[in-house]
Image (tube, helix red, strand yellow):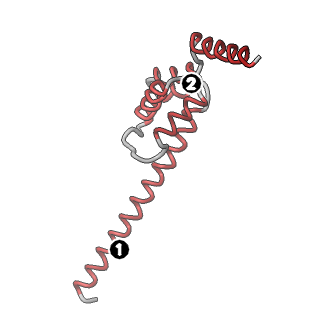
Amino acid sequence: MKRFAITIALLACGLLVACGSSKPSADECKAAIENMRQIRGTSKVDTGADPRRAVRSCQGNSSKKTVQCFINAKTTEDLDKCEGSTGEKYFEQEKKAQEEIERKVREREADEAKNKADEQKDDTGN
């Protein structure tokens, strides 16, 4: 009985391999994510969604059809037409990261301006 169950399990695994998976590969997900970032203009942002985590999420939650749609997209409108919410979730994270970067830049600029004003005040003795 145990041998029969093992044989059935091996046959099922073989059929899955032979028929192919409906899930995208890591390379397909990476290509889709890179294309989405390029189109959205976030390809040069170093923060945001962890790329490895994004690829794993893509593989677990997306269909090959959706990923191919993201890979083939040329415009933001094309991305919007793709099925699923993979891109939407990813870009929510990218948008939050970009807003955080912009907030930190504003804070740094304000600090630099304050420091410069303080230095000028010290130099003039006031």
Name the residue type under label 1.
Lys
Disc 1 crowd, CA 10 A, few/some/many (<14, 14-19, 20+): few
In the rendered structure, which disc, 1 or 2, sits on the residue that comes first in sequence?
2
Asked which quadrant contains residue 107, the reply is bottom left
Q: Nearer the viewer, mark 1 or mark 2?
A: 2
| Above or below 90: residue 64 | above
* Residue 24 numbered mark, or none: none
Q: Residue at x 43, y 47 (%)?
A: 47
The residue that appears at 41% across and 37% down in the rendered structure is 41
Relative horizontal placement of residue 106, taking residue 24 as reference (left or right): left
The C terminus appears in which quarter of the rendering?
bottom left
**Are there few (<14), some (14-19), or many (20+) residues within 10 Å of tag 2?**
some
The residue positioned 48% from the left and 49% from the top of the image is 97
Left or right of 90, for residue 118: left
Residue assigned mark 2: 82
- Residue position marked by numbered label 1 in the rendering: 114
Quarter of the rendering occupied by the N terminus: top right
Residue 118 drawn above or below residue 105: below
Q: In x, y percent, where is residue 118?
A: 31, 79
Which element carries disc 1, helix, strand or loop?
Answer: helix
Q: Is residue 7 left or right of residue 31?
A: right
Q: Nearer the viewer, residue 36 or 21?
A: 21
Secondary structure type for disc 2: loop
User: Which one is in front, 51 or 37?
Assistant: 51
Measuring from the top left, give residue 31's x and y in whole percent. Answer: 43, 27
Amino acid carrying label 2: it is Cys
Q: Residue at x 44, y 26 (%)?
A: 27
- Residue 68's spot in the image, x, y percent? 51, 20
